[in-house]
Each structure stands twice: as C-alpha cells, then as structure tokens.
Amino acid sequence: MLSTGSNLPDSVSDKLPPKPEIGLPLWLLAELTYRCPLQCPYCSNPLDFAEQGKELSTEQWIKVFREAREMGAAQLGFSGGEPLVRQDLAELIAEARKLGFYTNLITSGIGLTEQKISDFKKAGLDHIQISFQASDEQVNNLLAGSKKPSRKNSKWPAR
C-alpha cells in the first residue's frame, strides 16, 4: 500500500476530506505606486523609490487588469504607497469597472477631496477603505511619521 506520510491510521485518514485544489485568483491587489506622503516606520515599500525604476503606465496597468480578469479575478484593490498620487486613478477605476471588477480604493485619505470622491464614483468605484494609524492624533502622527493627517487639513471629527 502507498504511504501518505500521515501518522494517522488508514481508517481515519480515509475519512478526511481531500486537500482542496488551488482555486482561481479572486482578488488583485494593484500597488499602483511606491510614492506616499507618509513615512510609516513599518511600511514595506522601498525607501529608495528613485532606485526602484518607473511605475507602470496607465496602459500597462490596464493590461494587468485584463489578464487578471481573464484568470478569474473579480475584485480589484487600488493600493500603494498612496494611490491618490496617481493622476490617472479615475481612468484606472473606469477601466476596471468596464472589465467587471468590484473596485476598492485603499488609501490614507491624504489628498482625498470631495471632487475626487465624485470623480471616482462616476468612474465606478465601489468602496473606499481609509487607513488610520490611530484614533489619537498625536499617536497617529507618530506612527505615520507625519503631521499631515491633522484636523487642520482633514475632516476628522473633533473629540
């Protein structure tokens, strides 16, 4: 009899469900840029962005989206760095919508304006996920390495 490498008796291992096959990719996380206005100490983006080369162009990203859709991906997350620094973000959202993706913007919110929200909605954005480092402004600024998301230039509610 062929050994499975299991220490379980055959009577038990025969009753276990088969190992699932690897399925289609359902989610594409598109890290559109390494650029970011924050300097979070735990971030995995390279610190030497200039040494990393150029970002993918709009057309290159759309090709990636098409390929992911052909493979079965149904959801697309726009991330980075900070995806709001991309001037073509509304266009990328619109192309993703045309391909049938459920779209999600993952952002620090820095640079997010009412006009951009309106543009993204018109382009077909389904969801915005805003990342806060902490609910306390001082702790947030410490963790983010920046004072940019302060109440002075954002719509954080006063406590």
Image (spheres, grey):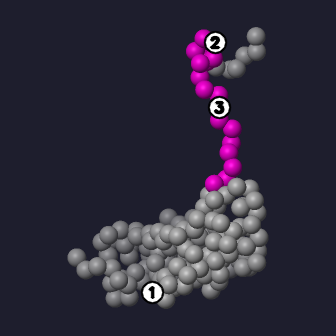
- Judge left or right: residue 135 versus residue 18: left
In this figure, which residue is indicated by the disc labeled 2? 10
Quick one: SS at disc 2?
helix
Magenta-span inclusion, residue 79: no
The front one of 98 and 156 is: 98
Query: The disc labelled 2 sits on which kind of residue?
Result: Asp
The front one of 37 and 91 is: 91
Q: CA distance from mark 2 to mark 1?
A: 63 Å
The residue positioned 67% from the left and 58% from the top of the image is 73
In this figure, which residue is indicated by the disc labeled 3? 19
The spot of residue 117 in percent (x, y) is 49, 82
The spot of residue 124 in percent (x, y) is 57, 75
In this figure, which residue is indicated by the disc labeled 1? 114
Number of other residues with Cα within 10 Å of mark 2, as a class: few under 14, some 14 to 19, many 20 or more: few
The spot of residue 40 in percent (x, y) is 48, 71
Q: Is residue 113 above or below residue 46?
A: below
| Residue 128 shows up from this direction | yes
| Residue 52 shows up from this direction | no
Query: The disc labelled 3 sits on which kind of residue?
Result: Lys
Quick one: SS at disc 1?
helix
Q: Disc 2 or disc 1, which is closer to the eye?
A: 1
